[in-house]
């Protein structure tokens, strides 16, 4: 994959951009894993929703190798996901939670299509290995929050396909995420601090080609809608 940085927008530009969200950013899908490490994905989804008014669809599934011994293991896992939602957002009633079963990749692609999602946000621990695949299958950018480096604070990595339409959409999503972050930083810190970030907040990575095995992928309709309570 090749990587491009998205120029930082100023506060005035960020405000104007966030106030002029087109219909293409009305819905976001975020993956919940129920772990503190996965909270960053939900924080990003929540920030975008609060700034743009986009709806959020939360989705989860039982991890591979999840222990099925003990009392009510599925209920315990779903309880951890619900607790994660309550940790992040005060708009819990507007975050619809769905449990995927069966062929998760195809289910996730189908869900994103049904929701007309403009962005899929995933936990960082599964991002590097799965984001390119999910980008190709869903046809939309896949974003995650990367850890801090020596030169930068936290960054959002946004994975997209190589065609021109996908590139244009991804860079627009990157500008929105940057605008949301810029306004958030302005509320929490002094202007001098957030204008001196050493590197762009969003990096766009391109998936150059579609593997042949995706051509034979089949979708499944096994899913279960849930309500967090």
Image (tube, rainbow, N blue to C red):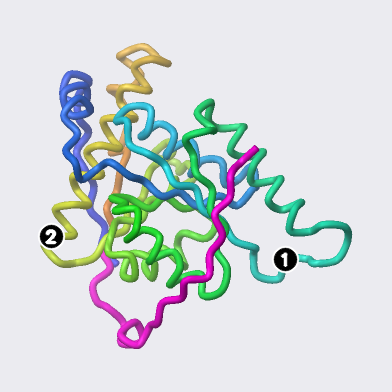
Q: Is residue 94 within the magenta segment?
A: no
For this orientation, the residue located farthest to the right is: 70
User: Could you tell me which quadrant the N terminus lies in?
Assistant: bottom left
Please give left or right for residue 3 compared with residue 126 in the image.
left
Front position in the image: 42 or 190: 42
Q: Residues within 10 Å of mark 1 (few under 14, many from 20)?
A: few
Q: In the rendering, at what x and y percent does residue 17 appear?
A: 18, 29
| Relative height, residue 130 to residue 205 (above, below) | below
Q: In the rendering, at what x and y percent does residue 168 appear?
A: 14, 53
Q: Which residues are magenta?
A: 206-229
| Relative height, residue 4 to residue 16 (above, below) | below
Q: In the rendering, at what x and y percent does residue 176 appear?
A: 25, 37
**Residue depicted at 33% across the width and 65% down the height:** 138
* Residue holding disc 1: 66
Residue 28 badge: none
Please give left or right for residue 28 compared with residue 103 in the image.
left
For this orientation, the residue located farthest to the top is: 190
Label 2, label 1: how far apart the Cα atoms are: 38 Å
Secondary structure of the residue carrying numbered label 1: loop
User: Could you tell me which quadrant the C terminus lies in?
Assistant: top right
Secondary structure of the residue carrying numbered label 2: helix
Please give left or right for residue 34 compared with residue 132 in the image.
right
**Residue depicted at 22% across the width and 52% down the height:** 170
Residue 165 badge: 2
**Residue depicted at 27% across the width and 53% down the height:** 204
| Relative height, residue 158 to residue 161 (above, below) | above
- Quadrant of residue 82 in the image? top right
- Quadrant of residue 219 in the image? bottom left
Q: Earlier in the sequence, mark 2 or mark 1?
A: 1
Q: In the rendering, at what x and y percent does residue 95 appear?
A: 49, 39
């Amino acid at each position: 994959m090749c990587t491009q940085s998205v120029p930082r927008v100023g506060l005035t530009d960020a405000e104007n951009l966030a106030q002029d969200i087109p219909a293409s950013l009305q819905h976001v899908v975020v993956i919940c894993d129920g772990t503190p490490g996965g909270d960053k994905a939900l924080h990003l989804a929540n920030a975008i929703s609060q700034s743009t008014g986009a709806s959020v669809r939360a989705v989860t599934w039982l991890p591979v190798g999840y222990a099925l011994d003990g009392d009510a293991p599925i209920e315990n896992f779903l309880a951890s996901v619900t607790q994660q939602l309550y940790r992040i957002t005060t708009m819990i009633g507007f975050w619809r939670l769905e449990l995927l079963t069966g062929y998760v990749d195809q289910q996730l692609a189908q869900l994103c299509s049904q929701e007309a999602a403009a962005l899929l946000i995933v936990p960082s621990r599964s991002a590097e290995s799965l984001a390119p695949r999910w980008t190709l299958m869903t046809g939309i950018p896949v974003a995650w929050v990367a850890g801090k480096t020596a030169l930068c604070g936290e960054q959002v990595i946004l994975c997209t396909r190589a065609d021109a339409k996908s590139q244009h959409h991804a860079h627009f999503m990157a500008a929105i995420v940057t605008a949301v972050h810029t306004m958030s930083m302005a509320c929490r810190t002094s202007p001098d601090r957030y204008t001196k970030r050493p590197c762009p907040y969003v990096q766009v990575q391109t998936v150059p080609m579609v593997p042949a095995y995706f051509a034979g992928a089949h979708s499944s309709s096994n899913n279960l809608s849930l309500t967090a309570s």
